[in-house]
């Protein structure tokens, strides 16, 4: 059965504690994207395309990717370290002795929380990135916020939203499963915990980057 108390604990761990770094990263990313794209298109007289280019770059591509990488570095490392420490200290064995499955008690809540919070954090990151781009457009480029938001609303389509959410769900699954697997397979005490944490983050990031390329090509062909 789903252990809702454990799930809510993991929702707090995965989401709330990751919010500051995700917000800061997304805001700076949106700010920089607008500045760079405006410099390129202004020469051609296409400054009105800046909001559309921000949407195309941020929502289906950089938003899920950067959020996934940030969460892999924080959530993936924390998951591997926590489960690895429990494994090394014998707590996993104690759960098995009490006929409590470590998978249902520890791993499933992490997976459920990641599947819920990664899309939520991606939506927050995209929203904050748009606000950062709007601030850059209004303060440095002289683009009116109302005009900027109109361009954003016109550029967002159902397909972009679908691609964004699909990527974030898959990235959340990758982070949860990789961190849990490396944590539960720790072999050599504290040294093994540190190594499992490092490998978990590395593989999570590599898989996210590779899967992002595959999904992008798949949706482009579709």
Image (cartoon, rainbow, N blue to C red):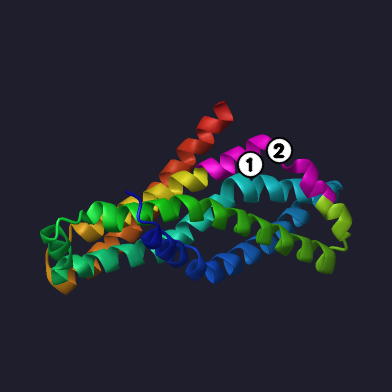
**Residue at position x 46%, y 37% from top?**
214
Residue at the spot of label 2: 157
* Residue 176 % position (x, y): 36, 54
Q: Per the image, is 158 magenta?
A: yes
Q: CA distance from mark 1 to mark 2?
A: 6 Å
The front one of 18 and 103 is: 103
Q: Please indicate whether residue 200 sits to the left or right of residue 140 in the image.
A: left
Residue labelled with disc 1: 161
Please tell me which residue is depicted at 15% across the width and 69% down the height of the picture.
Answer: 88
Residue 99: mark in rendering? none
Q: Nearer the viewer, residue 41 or 173?
A: 173
Q: Position of residue 221 (x, y in %)?
A: 56, 26
Residue 56, horizontal then vertical, whole percent: 67, 44
Residue displayed at 58% across by 52% down = 62
Mark 2 lies on a secondary structure that is: loop
Residue 221 can be seen in this image: yes
Q: Quick check: 33 above or below 89?
A: above
Secondary structure beneath dot 1 equals helix
Choose between 133 and 95: the one closer to the eye. Answer: 95
Magenta stretch? 150-166
Tell me the quarter of the image containing the C terminus. top right
Q: Residue furthest top?
A: 222
Cβ–Cβ under 8 Å for marks 1 and 2: yes
Q: Please rate how many residues cluster around mark 2, counting C-alpha atoms within 10 Å: few if below 14, some from 14 to 19, many from 20.
A: few
Q: Is residue 53 above or below residue 34?
A: above
């Amino acid at each position: 059965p789903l252990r809702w108390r454990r799930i809510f604990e993991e929702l707090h761990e995965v989401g709330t504690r990751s919010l500051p770094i995700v917000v800061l990263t997304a805001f700076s990313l949106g700010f920089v994207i607008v500045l760079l794209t405006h410099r390129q298109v202004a020469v051609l007289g296409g400054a009105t395309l800046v909001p559309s280019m921000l949407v195309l770059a941020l929502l289906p591509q950089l938003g899920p990717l950067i959020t996934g990488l940030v969460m892999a570095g924080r959530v993936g490392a924390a998951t591997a370290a926590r489960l690895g420490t429990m494994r090394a200290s014998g707590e996993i064995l104690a759960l098995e002795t009490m006929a409590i499955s470590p998978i249902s008690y520890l791993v499933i809540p992490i997976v459920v929380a990641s599947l819920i919070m990664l899309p939520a954090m991606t939506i927050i990151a995209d929203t904050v990135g748009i606000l950062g781009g709007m601030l850059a457009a209004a303060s440095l480029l002289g683009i009116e916020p109302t005009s900027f938001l109109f361009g954003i609303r016109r550029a967002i389509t159902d397909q972009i939203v679908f691609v964004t959410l699909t990527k974030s769900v898959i990235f959340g699954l990758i982070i949860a499963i990789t961190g849990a697997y490396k944590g539960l397979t720790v072999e050599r005490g504290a040294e093994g915990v540190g190594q499992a944490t490092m490998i978990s983050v590395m593989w999570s990031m590599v898989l996210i980057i590779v899967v992002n390329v595959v999904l992008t090509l798949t949706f482009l062909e579709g």
